[in-house]
Image (spheres, helix red, strand yellow):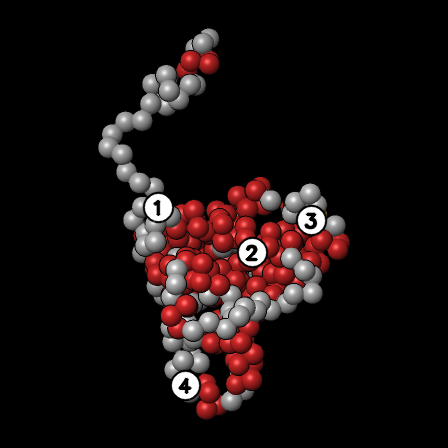
Amino acid sequence: LDEVDVVLDPLKSELNWPLGTRAPLDFTAQTSPPGLRWRVPYLLLDAVIGAASEDPSAVVPSSPERDDDESDAGDDDDDRCLEADGEEVREAARLENNEAAKADPYFRGDDEGVASRLKLARARAEIRMVVRSGLIEGQMQARPHPTLVSERWYRDELRPALAAWVLLLLRSPTRAAAALAGAAYAGDLGGLDDQQVLAYLGVATEPGARDRAAAAVDACCSDDQAKLLNLYHSWLAHMLPFAL
């Protein structure tokens, strides 16, 4: 083993030579649209980098009014659905305490529902506030590009906000969440409650909660549901702070 450069060369060494039939990785070619495995990190990075790069006075996203034909124009419009249109947020805020509005199936979140998108907008606003606070306190830096300074701050402050947003995405009935965040594969998440999902994503409020959540995932979730939760957990707990 003295020729370590040859032994470790993936194009020459038998230790690294691929064997068997080629198969795509989970959540790549077989998803619709394809590439969910790569959309997840972009989704999380966009939430953090976008919050660190934007005008600190921005709280709730807004966009020009679009008609129904434009709203189905493709992925660019679907991306916006992961937050909420400014007009829909204002309408939801006006109707939020109106019992008649709550009885309306559209308001309850039925396919692009106002209530669901309002919750997503509020979760993104929370991420923005956490990131802006981190920039002020020196836990992150914005120049020359958004960079994480304190892993402890990420674990204690930013990761819980991101996990809460991810949970809403996985529970969301919107078409965009189904296609771009994996909600179509999440289903009911094996009947897990919100606290169990958050604990599995790495936001545990008490000792042993993560282990109990992992046991519940093993017992209740399908393969796709468990793989999706593992993908989000890996990024939230390990790869995202490293990438930042």
Could you tell me the amino acid type at mark 1?
A: Thr
In the image, is residue 96 above or below residue 217? Answer: below
| Alpha carbon separation for disc pair 4 and 1 | 37 Å
Q: Which residue is mark 3?
A: 142
Residue 229 - label: none
| Alpha carbon separation for disc pair 2 and 3 | 14 Å
Residue 28 - label: 1
Q: Are marks 4 and 2 in contact (CB under 8 Å)?
A: no
Of marks 3 and 1, the one in the foreground:
3
Report x, y in % for residue 145.
Answer: 65, 45
In the image, is residue 204 above or below residue 235? Answer: below
SS of the residue at dot 2?
Answer: helix
Q: Is residue 14 visible?
A: yes
For the point 52% across and 85% down, which residue is it?
95
Report x, y in % for residue 48.
Answer: 59, 53
| Mark 2 / mark 3, whichever is N-terminal | 2
Could you tell me the amino acid type at mark 4?
A: Asp
Residue 212 image-quadrant placement: bottom left
Residue 104 - label: 4
Q: Which residue is mark 2?
A: 47
Could you tell me the amino acid type at mark 3?
A: Ala
Q: Are marks 4 and 1 in contact (CB under 8 Å)?
A: no
